[in-house]
Image: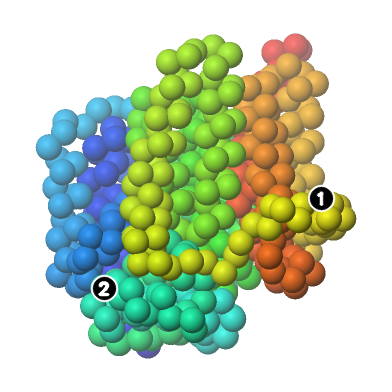
Amino acid sequence: MIADAGKLVVANALFFAAGVGVRRIVGSTHGGRTPSGFALTYLVGLASFGVLAQLLLVAGLAVSRLQAICLALVLFSLGFLRRARATGNPVASPVPGGRDTLLVLLAVALLVVVGIRSFYEPLESWDAWAFWIPRAKSLVLFNGLDAHYFAAPTTVNPDYPLLLPAVEATDFRFMGHFDTQIIHLQFWLVLVAFLGALPALLRDQVRPILVRSLVVVLACAPSLALHAESAYADVPLAVFVALAGVVGWRWLVLRDPATPGLFVVFAGAALATKVEGRLFVAALVVSLAALAARNSVRTTCEVLAAGVVSALLGIVPWAIWIRAHGIHGVYHADLAELGRHVHRIAPSLASLLGHGFDPLEWLLVLPTGIAAVLLAYRFGAARRTAAFVTATFLSSISLLVVTYWATSYPFAWHLQTSADRVVVAPILLVAVLTPVLLESVLRAGESTR
């Protein structure tokens, strides 16, 4: 087990190397050479590697161990063809005081506990062993994409994109066999990197106590840890969506020149992770474009162009491949019956919000975010940020409600088995921008004294 864990770490070191190159390509120096900056680099590399691995698989390659190494090294090398620019305010990490140190230690302790659980976690979650891990295994056993496997009637959700299976297949190739227990560490690494990367994107705009409090609250949120341990794709998807939201906010409000490239990376990764990624990326792009239109038509066009590029990289090639091979997903939107199924709207909305507001799942993450939005409107602070959070969250929830409204699955079963998972991404998006809103309120209060 320890040897397999070490080999998984080696595979993830490749993702980090890829992130170094991609961040130089887009000109990002957020977080500098701090642990937070390294965490962001790792996630950029994971997202970029996963998206490009899906493209290589669609093109007919196997993404073998050698090909994975070459892909990471190419991305790493391309970054050094461009001279690094100082963007993103790479401020040094402030030395934490006593109270801040306690917060940091609490977050670390919680993540260590989750990591130990992940190390010994058996593959028992249904979606993980039913189709996520089998898809990853198929990429190894069939040496790439096999149309017969994906078209087989026994294959579950064959239309789901390939970022996660490609990453897991790379882990398995480096392990040399299918260790379905150690693979849980991959999801723990994503969770740790996500919480570690938030200061890199927020620290230059938000006081440290707010950022550290956010990290501790998310580390304590039971639902986030439980879904990460399940080896489902919902937490990686939510991480990519939340990071796309943060860099989208920096693009919209701060005009950070490195963020358009980062937005394409994370939005493309969200699209390549799960079919729900299309809903969340659409909500992000439309919200950003609508708010940018009030000040700059050019920025609106840039946002829409970034959305198109994200789709071309993250989902269009895969969609073409499955259509060319006659592969269809099980879910079908029953639009003709929407009029007869209006009664589904209320329970869908109630279930999604019920999970979001449940303190046993998310503590007070969502109520705090809503309070921050209302305070921002009340004090006239960061209204564009508040509007962005509001628009993206409401449109994401609305699209999920429409999905359940039009589902061809048994409605009660579909809602019961997925609502707690699909709502993770909208909740994380609100959570990561809550410190920004609170910071604006605090500054408004300080300026009136």
Q: How is the image coloured?
A: rainbow
Would you say the residues marked 1 and 2 are in contact, meaning their CB atoms lie under 8 Å apart?
Answer: no
Q: Nearer the viewer, residue 294 or 22?
A: 294
Instruction: State which quadrant residue 430 falls in.
Output: top right
Residue at which label 2 appears:
144
Q: How many labels does the image show?
A: 2
Please tell me whether mark 2 sits on a helix, a strand or a loop.
loop
User: In the image, which disc is placed on residue 349?
Assistant: none
Query: Is residue 261 placed above or below 166 in the rendered structure?
Result: above
- For the residues carrying marks 1 and 2, which lies nearer the camera in this image? 1
Classify mark 2: residues with Cα within 10 Å, few (<14), some (14-19) or many (20+): many
CA distance separating discs 1 and 2: 43 Å
Instruction: State which quadrant residue 263 falls in.
Output: top left
Across and down, in percent, residue 299 comes to: 45, 19
Residue drawn at 74 percent across, 71 percent down:
410
Classify mark 1: residues with Cα within 10 Å, few (<14), some (14-19) or many (20+): few
Which quadrant does the C terminus fall into?
Answer: top right
Across and down, in percent, residue 433 comes to: 61, 37
Q: Nearer the viewer, residue 83 or 130?
A: 130
Instruction: State which quadrant residue 60 falls in.
Output: bottom left
Across and down, in percent, residue 86 comes to: 29, 27
Across and down, in percent, residue 412 comes to: 79, 69
Please tell me whether mark 1 sits on a helix, a strand or a loop.
helix
Return the disc, 1 or 2, that comes first in the chain's sequence: 2
For the residue marked with disc 1, what is the amino acid?
Gly
Residue drawn at 25 percent across, 53 percent down:
18
Residue drawn at 25 percent across, 28 percent down:
85
Give the farthest residue toward the front: 336
Residue at which label 1 appears:
339
For the residue marked with disc 2, what is the amino acid?
Gly
Q: Is residue 236 visible?
A: no
